[in-house]
Amino acid sequence: MRVWPRTLGMQLIVVTAVAVFLSNVAVAFWFELGSEKLNENALTERLLDRAGSIATLMGSIPPKARDTAARALTSNIWHFELRSGKDLPQPMNANEEKLAVRLKAMLSPKVAKLPVTVRFRDETPDDRLEHKHHHPRHGMAIEMTIPVVRNTQLIATFFRPPLPPWPAEISLAAIVAIVVASAAAAYIARRVARPLSKLADAASVAAGGGSAPRVPEVGPDDVRNAAIAFNAMTDQVTRTLESQRQLLSAVGHDLRTPITAMRINIEFVDEPELRERLQKNLDELQDLTEAVLSAARGTGGEARRQIDLAALVESVCADLDDLGEPVEWNGHAPAPICCRANEIRRAVRNLVENAVAYGKKADVAIEETAKAYEIVVDDDGPGIAEADRARVFEPFVRLEGSRNLDTGGSGLGLTLVKAIAEGHGGQVIMENRSQGGLRVRMRLPRDAATA
């Protein structure tokens, strides 16, 4: 179970609330310790003074009246009784010894020569019942044995109640501080997190090949400057891409015109062998020109629309099968996806044609996960070494080695496939099959419309 929030806004609110809570606890604890120490000193002074005064009083009244006086002075927190007999010094710890010394100082010099004992003990309800007094709260008892006259001691017991809980005012102040600080943190988080979230969404759209929307230039200066820079960057990229598309269109038109003219002129060449070589060179130049233009245009020139990916792949396989190519399609249920259909068709056709050209056959299927569809193309060829799998996506790289279009192609097919897949927020993965041959996966996210 994830406890720590993932969003910036919630993290800021949680951190602020925890910081305010801990600071309030620390301050309250600090003042409570100081107040407790002062109260402790004052309380100790009062109880020693009262015990000493009562012992002095007992020594000044007739012996027969002392028990009556002790009972009369007993209260809810004090208990007094007299004990006769010789009192011997009792062992005490350091704190008890300090209080005994202070208590002796309050007695007359004659009485102070006799033993004075102070003992701390935990008081339980049963103990209190033995004293026949009801004490509403359980706490510590301080028992003082003070000489009244020789062979008579006053046993004065003070029942100290437990420390009261923190006042409700402190808890209420802490709650108010946490609420106010959290509200302030939420306001700041909103001003920071919302522009950043929109910036991230726009960057995701741009990364998927789409036209990134403009990011609102609001928020603190740092966030606003980031939005301004992002908008300026996307504007520049859009202008550059549009300029490239226009230039490529012009180049394509200008290249096709002389190629067409050269085809016409070839018809006037009388030597058949020369005419055939020139025709073949022109075909190669025509194919290479079209491949270069398709790869350079990449993605983004077509609007996205909802299609059935399974039907599209099946139609590509059927077209190639009609041409006599060894292509096998493994049927799949409808696979709805929003994409640039013509680009996906071109990429699938390139993958299948590569499998047929280099692997003798193409076995095509669609696999799906919760988040993506995978177009899988298997062949029976020699596979590709792991060191070459990244290199085959580079322009004009052909592992076959020749420059013959019939055997090696233009070297741009996989470059185009990679550009189309990444333009839809996907990727292309190659792996050698254990039974031989190559497997190529073109992964397309189901939510490709927002990729």
Image (cartoon, rainbow, N blue to C red):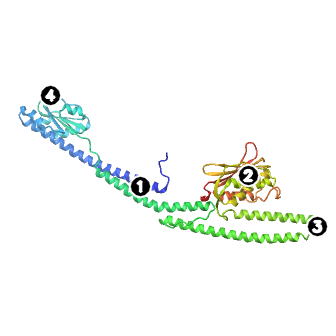
Give the percent coordinates (x, y) of residue 100.
20, 37
Determine the secondary structure under disc 3: loop
Determine the secondary structure under disc 4: loop
Q: Which residue is mark 1?
A: 16
Q: Distance between the Cα atoms at labels 3 and 4? A: 147 Å
For badge 3, the amino acid type reads Glu
Q: Quadrant of the C terminus?
A: bottom right
For badge 2, the amino acid type reads Asp
Establish if 1 lies above or below 411.
above
Point out the tag, 4 or 1, that comes first from the N-terminus: 1
**Given this view, does label 3 or label 4 mark the residue nearer the observer?**
3
Give the numbered dot on residue 86: 4
Residue at 81% across / 71% down in the picture? 258
Point out the tag, 3 or 4, that comes first from the N-terminus: 4
Mark 2 vs 4: CB contact within 8 A: no
Determine the secondary structure under disc 2: helix
For residue 292, which quarter of the picture? bottom right
Residue at 28% across / 45% down in the picture? 165
Give the percent coordinates (x, y) of residue 28.
32, 50
Q: Dot 3 surroundings within 10 Å: few (below 14), some, or many (20 or more)? A: few
Q: Which residue is mark 3?
A: 271
Give the numbered dot on residue 295: none
Point out the tag, 2 or 1, that comes first from the N-terminus: 1
Point out the tag, 2 or 4, that comes first from the N-terminus: 4
Give the percent coordinates (x, y) of residue 310.
68, 53
Q: Is residue 295 left or right of residue 279?
A: left
Q: Which residue is mark 2?
A: 388
Point out the tag, 3 or 1, that comes first from the N-terminus: 1
